[in-house]
Image (cartoon, rainbow, N blue to C red):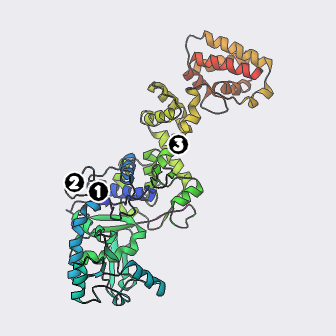
Amino acid sequence: MSDQKRVRVRFAPSPTGGLHLGGVRTVLFNYLFARHHQGDFILRIEDTDQTRYVEGAEQYILDCLSWCGLIPDERPQSGGEYGPYRQSERKHLYAQYAKQLIDNGHAYYAFDTPAELEQMRNSVANFRYDHSSRTQLRNSLTLSADEVSRLLEGDTPYVVRIKMPEDQVVSFTDAIRGEITFETSQVDDKVLLKADGMPTYHLAVVVDDYLMKITHAFRGEEWLPSAPVHLLLWEYLGWKDAMPQWAHLPLILKPDGHGKLSKRDGDRLGFPVYAMNWLDPRTGELTKGFRELGFLPQAFVNMLAMLGWNDGTDQEIFTLEELIEKFSLDRVSKAGAKFDFEKAKWFNAEWIKRLPVDELLPAVKNVLAQHNVTHTNDAYIEQVLRLVHDRLTFINDFWQQASFFFVAPQQYDLDAVKPRWSEQKTAYFNKLATCFEALQSWDAAGLETVFKELAAEDNLKTGEVMLPFRIMLVGGKFGPQVFDIAALLGKNKTLDRIAKALTLIRE
């Protein structure tokens, strides 16, 4: 392929449901490759199978890509010079190429009814429509030209099948796996054009990649068995020199490494496999996604990049810009990548620690809104976030770790306090409240000094009163440094909580 040819890659999903993380990784590798080479990334919707089309699925795919920050240069909504970008809107294009294949002897009309094919499957073990069986079936290879014309003129339903050659070897060089070879006799005569006039994936992907000038095609390794059909179509249509460079990506495997990761595995093991929540309009079933669990898009993208790729160093945390700069196909593994949810959580926690608090603010405010807290003081929320961000695995953990900054505790871990409580401690906290009340300045260092000096005066060890003080402020044995908590809560809330807790302890 000429070095001067502009890189053009595409992601071509079917709008049939939620977007699996394997699909998002395919998007990501396409996107990184395109951006690394200053090329174009195209979104093409493969909706030729109308029986599987699901309302809302296309918009869901767009929303997922938008959340991840992987925005296509050309797509159905924004267009481009190679549109339309939905295959259903390109239906008129495919029949001419199917006819060209028939005229050149590389494809044929097949008039077999579904019932006839089912009868063959029932009577012939491991039946395949291929070079060995096509001569016994009802198609334009076995019927006379007059009969074929009569059937076509009578609008008899038919499909168009590729005529796979016998005993040929076809091969191509995969950008990840190197030279791959196939024997054509092992491949059946795939349907290219369906009875409704819509193309199957096999014809559509070749025609569309050619017309859209796609230079590199990334897809999962499960598509390798289809490669010989596509190779021959590129050749038969006279486009062999324009065929994209293929790269078959490794599978994302179950955590135990045995088999491809599925939605069922996620349900069974308790983690999402979709990028975002997906509500199936047909069944009403909700499948949870990484976004709603509390993943940051930066962490999700970073985690996906490391499933089957690395830059050859020990670096694991990458910004999208760094991934674009360093991405190359020669660092993509041939072997499947085991999905490790604990590692995914680690990526998220690391990104929460690293991102500036102002970038986390919108997500945190959304968490607060879910708990009916509409706090408008962004500066205060950012201060809270600075105290707790290194304790968060998910953004949604913010409420568990910091709710006491916004609402007073409703429950207190009194069992951790009462067994060792004494009147001396009651007196200490009453005096502490008086001293706090008198303070002119209110900061963590000053509060700590008063707290410890007063404990020493009362012959109390700091540790004896530190835990009760924490529980008074937050309700339990958790949270950041206790004097930072008090400083941020302010004088009035701190004093109110000491008074309320003292009453509960003495009850």
What residue is drawn where x is 29% and y is 64%?
Answer: 216
Question: Residue 36 vs residue 402: left or right?
Answer: left
Which of the two residues, 175 or 290, is positioned nearer the viewer here? Answer: 290
Q: Earlier in the sequence, mark 2 or mark 3?
A: 2
Say how many tags the image has.
3
Amino acid of disc 1: Ile
- Image coordinates of residue 400 in percent, x first then y, are 59, 36
Residue 42, labelled with which disc?
A: 1
Front position among marks 1 and 3: 1
Report the predominant secondary structure element of the magenta stretch: loop
Earlier along the polypeptide chain: callout 1 or callout 2? 1
Mark sitting earlier along the chain (1/3): 1
- Where residue 486 sits, quadrant-wise, is top right
In the rendered structure, the answer to whether residue 397 lies left or right of residue 214 reads right
Quickly name the residue at label 2. Answer: 80
Magenta-span inclusion, residue 450: no
What whole-number distance in Å separates the C-alpha atoms at marks 1 and 3?
A: 32 Å
Q: Which residues are magenta?
A: 250-254
Q: Quadrant of residue 440?
A: top right
Among the 4 quarters of the image, the one containing residue 462: top right
In-image side of 1 versus 298 (left or right) = left
Which is more toward the observer, 455 or 244? 244
What residue is at 59 percent from the left and 28 percent from the top? 404
Residue 301 located left or right of residue 475: left
Residue 252 is a magenta residue: yes
Marks 2 and 1: in contact by CB < 8 Å?
A: yes
Residue 296, position in %: x, y? 46, 44
The amino acid marked with disc number 2 is Gly
Whole-percent x and y of residue 496? 63, 17
Which one is in front in this view, the residue at disc 2 or the one at disc 3?
2
